[in-house]
Image: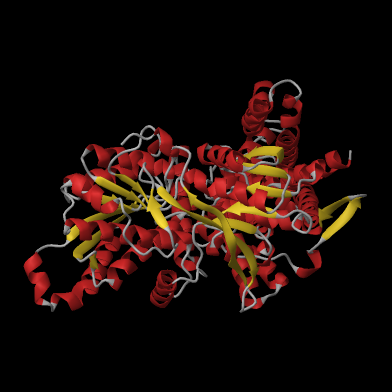
């Protein structure tokens, strides 16, 4: 871990090296430190890796700066352990005197990290997890969500099921908080009939019993939320049970990213996915991001990479407004709120609870130009969609 | 009716999968007295080796051989290098050391293969579904797993009941000291048994590849269930492992399938679903508690 951090410092310094030649920087003093607490180890490690790499990419593209301010990114791995995340946050606050933090991937880690940061008058900008707790009554002036409020993922899937004309849905999610949120979110906008609602276990690997239930219920389509490895096992078994031929599937983006796609292969063809962005978006900002990311890291960016990139851009826009200062919290908020950056997603704004108001898109897994399955954007599902909790927020 | 039959088949199939893992675990624990937490890692080794070879060569047969060989060799190496030093030690030391092995194998797999799950396809002849029950297509691959599992069970029965090695294994499980006193090379027997256990775990892992997710940490997910099977069946007994595995597989599958419907007859929809999900996840542990209450040494205790 120490090695990784040193490495990143070196990488950050290398990115800034061409700048050092410029006289301007030598006068502006030390770089602004930004703390990134993210998940880099374990099965979910690739999410944090993409967020980190895209954030660094945004810094590199501006020559080691964000919004004209030289910045230094300190990265630490929380290993998906809330306790570890909290310790890192305390160390960042106390030893490194960092006031601006970002990076957490998973909601349970976020719950342990963010209160400490906010209590110490720090600012937290979330590139991924945004549970309802920070969106409604408990919203905070210094908490910003860049990706989405968690429910948005599932609401858009519910709307997509309406649009696709699915009248009878079978829905499944693991029996834990995010799984329950998924079911609630999906039901919020879905207007048809739910013919089956099943909670699976988080440690479950065999879904044969669920497959038989789905077949017996004869739904128009299936919605399931199984992140990471769970989703891969579920999809494979779904195809092997012969269900993919008869029953289409609607998914939220965390259940089907380019990594999952590579592990599932052909089995994923025909699946509907909703997301706030996709790598085939045809706007200048998105093309620029995808080109730079692919050239730098030699892989297709996932949604998480895009979220990490937007997080860096949003922070850059705020720093530009404040002249690189993060100690005046009101000034930072005023500069952040207009979201004055060019997001690859297209339209992006902050709602009253400082969570995104954005468009959601329907993607479909189809055979790409190279014959391999790829995510292809099909159209818009929701426009200017905020979240259900914004009304309860009094900032 | 067809649905019930299908669910029974699903339960049996999960059961034989658990049996392959539990057989090795119970032998190692029964004969050597070692609690091997790293058994799940051998399952992972089998899955990764087979997935890698399948991706490189495209041959299912080579993948099968590679998975078996890798798991057995790694297993025997672990026995020679690490476990051999732990037989005389306290269970706590063994748990600590084998837990360390889990971390070692997981990090090793990350270094070699990365964090992204690997893709494994079903071998060509086993793709598609077979209609064994009219109107219900059942995946051919799952039937193959069921068949392999039952064959292995029969093979183990023959090995343990009707061969000289099997006699030593049985004797080792019940009268360890006596076997040693009679001049049997216990060390070689231990390595052999551990290798056999690892081989079976590898077999389970490589067969699981096409239906589960081949990723770091996959062994730990299924290890807990395996321990439940071993405890229910009676430590050291392969027959117990088979009965325990089928019991756990069937009860887990049937509870997941039918509890929600049963409870929905008695109470409100969402409450019934939530309660059923909770009860179904507790199901196998309740079963274990019940068995321990009635037969504190498991169903077929090996030690006298």
* Residue at left offset 70%, top offset 43%: A170
Q: Position of residue B272 (x, y in %)?
A: 67, 26
Q: Position of residue B217 (x, y in %)?
A: 52, 52
Q: Quadrant of the N terminus of chain A?
A: bottom left
From this viewpoint, is residue B188 visible? no
Q: Quadrant of the C terminus of chain A?
A: top left
Describe the colour scheme in one phrase: secondary structure
Q: Position of residue A199 (x, y in %)?
A: 63, 38
- Would residue A157 appear left or right of A321 to someone viewing this image? right
Vertical side of A62 occupied by B299: above or below: above
Viewer-nearest residue: A131 or B210: A131
- Would residue B208 appear left or right of A217 to someone viewing this image? left
* Residue at left offset 90%, top offset 50%: B135
Viewer-nearest residue: B32 or A188: A188
- Would residue B235 appear left or right of A139 to someone viewing this image? right
Viewer-nearest residue: A40 or B170: A40
Q: Residue furthest left?
A: A27
**Residue A344 appears in which quarter of the rendering?**
bottom left
Q: Position of residue A261 (x, y in %)?
A: 59, 64
* Residue at left offset 75%, top offset 53%: A247
Disc tally is 0
Vertical side of A189 occupied by B118: above or below: below
From this viewpoint, is residue A44 visible? yes
């Amino acid at each position: 871990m120490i090695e990784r951090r040193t490495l990143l410092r070196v990488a950050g310094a290398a990115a800034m090296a061409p700048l050092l030649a410029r006289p301007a920087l030598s006068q502006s003093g030390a770089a602004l430190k930004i703390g990134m607490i993210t998940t880099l180890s374990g099965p979910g490690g690739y999410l944090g890796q993409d967020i980190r790499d895209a954030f660094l990419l945004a810094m590199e593209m501006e020559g080691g700066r964000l919004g004209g301010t030289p910045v230094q990114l300190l990265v630490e791995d929380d290993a998906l352990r809330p306790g570890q995340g909290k310790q890192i946050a305390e160390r960042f606050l106390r030893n490194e005197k960092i006031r601006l933090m970002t990076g957490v991937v998973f909601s349970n880690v976020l719950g342990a990290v963010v209160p400490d940061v906010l209590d110490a008058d720090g600012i937290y900008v979330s590139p991924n997890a945004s549970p309802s707790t920070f969106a409604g009554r408990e919203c905070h002036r210094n908490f910003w969500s860049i990706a989405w409020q968690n429910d948005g993922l599932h609401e858009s899937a519910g709307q997509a099921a309406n649009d696709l004309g699915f009248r009878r849905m079978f829905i499944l999610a693991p029996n834990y908080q995010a799984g329950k949120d998924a079911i609630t979110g999906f039901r919020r906008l879905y207007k048809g009939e739910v013919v089956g609602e099943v909670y699976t276990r988080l440690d479950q690997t065999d879904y044969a019993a669920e497959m038989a239930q789905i077949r017996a219920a004869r739904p128009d389509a299936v919605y399931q939320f199984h992140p990471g490895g769970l989703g891969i096992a579920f999809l494979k078994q779904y195809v092997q049970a012969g269900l993919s031929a008869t029953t289409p599937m609607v998914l939220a983006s965390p259940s089907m990213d380019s990594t999952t796609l590579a592990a599932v292969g052909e089995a994923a063809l025909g699946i509907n996915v909703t997301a706030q962005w996709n790598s085939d978006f045809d706007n200048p900002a998105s093309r620029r991001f995808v080109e730079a990311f692919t050239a730098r890291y030699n892989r297709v960016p996932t949604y998480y990479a895009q979220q990490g990139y937007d997080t860096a851009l949003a922070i850059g826009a705020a720093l530009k407004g404040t002249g690189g200062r993060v100690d005046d919290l009101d000034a930072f908020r005023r500069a952040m709120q207009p979201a004055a950056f060019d997001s690859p997603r297209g339209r992006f704004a902050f709602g009253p609870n400082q969570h995104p108001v954005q468009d959601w898109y329907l993607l479909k897994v189809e055979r790409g130009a190279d014959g391999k399955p790829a995510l292809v954007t099909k159209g818009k599902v929701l426009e200017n969609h905020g979240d259900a909790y914004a009304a309860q927020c009094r900032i | 009716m067809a649905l019930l039959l299908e669910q029974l088949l699903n339960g049996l199939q999960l059961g034989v999968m658990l049996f392959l893992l539990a057989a090795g675990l119970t032998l190692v624990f029964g004969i050597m007295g070692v609690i091997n937490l790293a058994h799940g890692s051998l399952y992972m080794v089998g899955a990764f080796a087979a997935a890698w070879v399948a991706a490189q060569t495209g041959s299912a047969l080579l993948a099968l051989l590679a998975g078996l060989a890798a798991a057995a060799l790694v297993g025997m190496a672990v026995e020679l290098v690490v476990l051999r030093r732990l037989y005389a030690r306290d269970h706590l030391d063994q748990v600590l050391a084998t837990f360390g092995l889990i971390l070692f194998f997981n990090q090793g797999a990350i270094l070699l293969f990365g964090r992204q799950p690997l893709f494994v396809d079903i071998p060509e002849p086993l793709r598609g579904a077979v209609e064994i029950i009219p109107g219900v297509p059942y995946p051919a691959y799952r039937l193959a797993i069921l068949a392999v599992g039952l064959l292995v069970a029969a093979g183990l029965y023959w090995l343990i009941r009707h061969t000289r090695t099997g006699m030593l294994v049985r004797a080792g499980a019940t009268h360890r000291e006596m076997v040693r006193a009679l001049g049997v090379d216990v060390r070689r027997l231990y390595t052999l048994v551990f290798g056999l256990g690892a081989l079976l775990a590898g077999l389970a892992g490589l067969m699981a590849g096409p239906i589960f997710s081949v990723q770091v940490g996959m062994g730990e997910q299924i290890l807990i269930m395996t321990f439940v099977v071993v405890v229910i069946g009676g430590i050291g007994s392969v027959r117990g492992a088979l009965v325990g595995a089928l019991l756990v597989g069937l009860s887990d599958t049937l509870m997941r399938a039918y509890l929600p419907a049963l409870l929905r007859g008695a109470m409100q929809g969402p409450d019934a679903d939530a309660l059923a999900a909770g009860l179904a996840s507790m199901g196998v542990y309740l079963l274990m508690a019940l068995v321990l209450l009635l037969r504190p040494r498991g169903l077929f205790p090996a030690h006298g």
